[in-house]
Image (tube, rainbow, N blue to C red):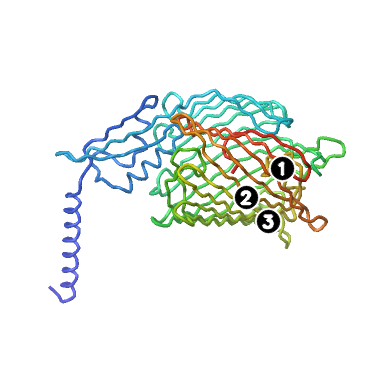
């Protein structure tokens, strides 16, 4: 044997001994002998088993157990999840206990202010046939746009695979919204790829306002499709590059002789993106919902995208577009949670930037005592050199509850909300809470206008249903607009922010 081959042989022998030792150590680790599912009343057991990230014969892994519990809790028809292990002579018996929530309901829909109320009814089943499929039928009479009917169906595990199918059929007095999506989303943190495509057709009436009054309106028709592919790298920090192709065709029609309407356009826009994300989670109570423990995503992320539309590809004009979002997430104290979000997007064509949109927001939640909380929101938004006559509205539906939904408009908007949320009654089937709040904001168009801050204090009531799908919260608020000395009453679903 030569001198050169001897070190190589020693290295190979050491590597084989290391692998053998690793295999022997893994054989000594506890393995899963049996998996038992408890707590199911309406859900097929296979729906739970297909979400498990471990199987009989696997080595018990605490990281996979924790992620499995999060995945199960994301199902709208599943509440609390407990996964326990018990040693047996043949291995480990894993028991998965789930809270099977009520997922079928006939519920009223009501939103808006008392003299501009949208109402209707929705029949839904978030666990159709006990197979985890979603079915929703809604009938509404919308205050501004009139009657609307909508049918939604989603199969999150097509043929018990990781692929999903979703369909929407919706039509009303002023338009329609149809969509079909086939996708393979990221189902676990260890997934390496996601892909999908969607087709959509939409028609709606867009309205522009001045001082709360309708200035003009036009019909907007949009047909198109989108195709995307994303890869995922890393463990503690996720790097997810992606490619996307979106094709759209838009047509605009003025609704009156003197009405404004943008120019028709066709866009073929390939783009590339990158997401950098630190997956972290916190189990918390009384932050966004009323009572149930929530899986708060406390990991920060950065998202970037660059794309190009070119006449040679079939677009009506040539331009590049840029998009960036930075979202720091952190916990100032053990009883608080903060979200910062910075976003900007713009187009560049013919040597200049236009269609610039920028926003910055900060939301903080503080737990007070055992069952109370305080929520604070500050946000700023700006439009610049819009391709269309776009605007930012401010009022009841946009963060200022003491004023009409479209009372203020402009290309700049600033908003401040603070809301104390005391919990009054806690029962297994319902939670009754209240809210005392102050909203302040302004919308204006520089340079001809200046920011004129207006405020509205108010009181509200909250009713939560922790045993029903998605833990819905019924909200009712009354607010007093200090500038106009008027009251606005509003109702809706979910916390205001």
Pointer 1 residue = 395
Residue 486 sits in which quadrant? top right
Residue 259 at x, y percent in the picture? 84, 39
Taking the spot 45% from the left edge, 42% from the top edge, the residue there is 294
Pointer 2 residue = 269
Which one is nearer the viewer's eye here, 448 or 387? Answer: 448
Which one is nearer the viewer's eye here, 52 or 74? Answer: 74
Q: Secondary structure at mark 2?
A: strand
Pointer 3 residue = 347
Q: Earlier in the sequence, mark 2 or mark 3?
A: 2
Q: Earlier in the sequence, mark 2 or mark 1?
A: 2
Q: Earlier in the sequence, mark 1 or mark 3?
A: 3
Give the alpha-carbon distance from disc 2 to disc 1, as whole Å: 35 Å
Q: Is residue 133 visible?
A: no
Circles 1 and 3, Cβ within 8 Å, touching? The answer is no
Q: For the residues carrying marks 2 and 1, which lies nearer the camera in this image?
A: 1
Q: Is residue 437 above or below residue 301?
A: above
What is the crowding at mark 2: few (fewer than 14 residues within 10 Å), some, or many (at least 20)? many
Taking the spot 64% from the left edge, 33% from the top edge, the residue there is 491
Residue 437 at x, y percent in the picture? 63, 44
Q: Is residue 345 visible?
A: yes
């Amino acid at each position: 044997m030569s001198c050169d081959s001897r070190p190589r042989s020693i290295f190979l022998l050491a590597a084989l001994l290391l692998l053998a030792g690793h295999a022997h150590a893994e054989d000594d680790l506890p393995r899963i002998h049996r998996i038992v599912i408890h707590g199911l009343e309406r859900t097929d057991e296979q729906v739970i088993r297909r979400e498990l990230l471990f199987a009989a014969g696997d080595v018990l892994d605490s990281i996979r157990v924790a992620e499995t519990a999060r995945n199960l809790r994301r199902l709208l028809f599943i509440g609390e999840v407990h996964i326990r292990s018990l040693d047996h002579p043949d291995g480990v018996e894993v028991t998965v206990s789930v809270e099977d929530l009520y997922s079928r309901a006939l519920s009223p829909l009501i939103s808006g202010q008392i003299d501009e109320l949208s109402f209707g009814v929705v029949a839904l089943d978030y666990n159709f046939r006990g197979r985890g499929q979603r079915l929703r039928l809604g009938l509404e009479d919308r205050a501004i746009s009139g009657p609307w009917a909508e049918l939604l169906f989603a199969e999150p595990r097509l043929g018990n695979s990781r692929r999903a199918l979703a369909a929407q059929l919706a039509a009303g007095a002023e338009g329609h919204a149809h969509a079909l999506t086939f996708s393979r989303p990221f189902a676990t943190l260890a997934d390496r790829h996601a892909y999908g495509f969607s087709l959509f057709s939409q028609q709606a009436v867009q309205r522009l306002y001045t001082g709360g009054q309708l200035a003009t309106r036009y019909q907007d028709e949009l047909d198109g499709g989108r195709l995307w592919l994303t890869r995922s790298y890393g463990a503690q920090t996720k790097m997810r590059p992606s490619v996307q192709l979106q094709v759209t065709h838009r047509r605009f029609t003025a609704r009156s002789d003197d009405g404004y309407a943008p120019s028709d356009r066709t866009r073929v826009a390939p783009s590339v993106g990158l997401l950098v994300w630190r997956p972290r989670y916190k189990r918390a109570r009384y932050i966004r919902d009323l009572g149930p423990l929530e899986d708060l995503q406390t990991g920060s992320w950065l998202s970037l995208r660059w794309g190009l539309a070119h006449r040679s590809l079939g677009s009506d004009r040539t331009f590049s577009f840029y998009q960036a979002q930075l979202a720091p997430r952190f916990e100032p104290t053990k009883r608080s949670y903060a979200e910062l979000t910075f976003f900007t997007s713009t187009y560049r064509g013919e040597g200049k930037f236009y269609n610039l949109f920028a926003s910055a927001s900060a939301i903080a939640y503080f737990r007070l005592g055992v069952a109370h909380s305080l929520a604070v929101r500050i946000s700023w938004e700006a439009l610049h050199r819009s391709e269309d006559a776009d605007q930012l509205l401010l009022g009841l539906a946009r963060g200022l509850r003491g004023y009409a939904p479209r009372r203020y408009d402009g290309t700049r908007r600033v908003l401040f909300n603070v809301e104390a949320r005391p919990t009054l009654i806690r029962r297994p089937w319902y939670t009754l809470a209240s809210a005392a709040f102050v909203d302040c904001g302004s919308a204006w168009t520089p340079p001809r206008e200046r920011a004129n801050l207006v405020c509205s204090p108010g009181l509200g009531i909250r009713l939560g249903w922790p045993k029903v799908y998605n833990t819905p919260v019924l909200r009712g608020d009354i607010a007093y607009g200090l500038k106009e000395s008027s009251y606005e009453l509003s109702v809706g679903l979910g916390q205001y922010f």
